[in-house]
Image (cartoon, rainbow, N blue to C red):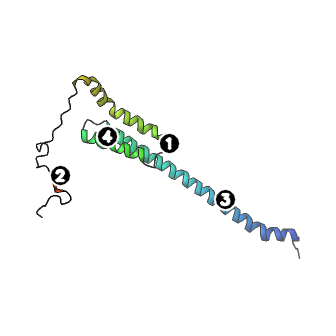
Amino acid sequence: MTSFPTWAVWTLSFGLPVLTGVSAFLGQYIGHRASHDLEIRSKREEVMRNLRWCAELAVSDDAAKARLGVEELEALRDSKMLAPSEEGFVYAALRASVKVPRQAIDRSASEVEVVVRTDSDITGKNPVSSEEGEQGEVTDI
């Protein structure tokens, strides 16, 4: 009958479970780090996709789309999704979206005329009296 030395029995009894535990922990750590990196990368891709979409809208010829694009760029700038390195892209897109209107304003600097209208012709409705206070208007529902 062949017997193992005592040190080999102890090594096999305690060494293999410890080695298995360490390798399982190491595999879990590497997998978690890889999934975290993947999530950061996917967030960055989504931010850049949104930035591209907002920038295209902001320079649109349609005023409503351009306004939406600028509002979305400002919302993206204020969001927590942006990394500090990506803020420069948002500011560049905002500067580009206001470049043409700013040039038009600069060219017509001497021709600017501000018109203030306070009558009811603007909205087509009767103005609400400030004397009504907290009561407001009564509507028929």
Dot placed on the residue nearer the N-terminal end, 2 or 4: 4
In the structure shown, which secondary structural element does the residue marked by tag 3 occupy? helix
Spatial CA distance of label 2 from label 4 is 40 Å
Provide residue 63's location: percent of width, then percent of height: 25, 38
Name the mark nearer the viewer: 2 or 4: 2
Quarter location, residue 135: bottom left
Residue bearing mark 3: 26
Name the mark nearer the viewer: 4 or 1: 1
Q: Residues within 10 Å of mark 2 (few under 14, many from 20)?
A: few
Amino acid carrying label 1: it is Pro
Dot placed on the residue nearer the N-terminal end, 1 or 2: 1
Q: Could you say which disc has been placed on residue 130 in the image?
A: 2
Quadrant of the image containing the C terminus: bottom left
Residue bearing mark 1: 84
Residue found at x 27% / y 23%:
107
Provide residue 55's location: percent of width, then percent of height: 36, 39
Residue bearing mark 4: 57
Spatial CA distance of label 2 from label 3 is 71 Å
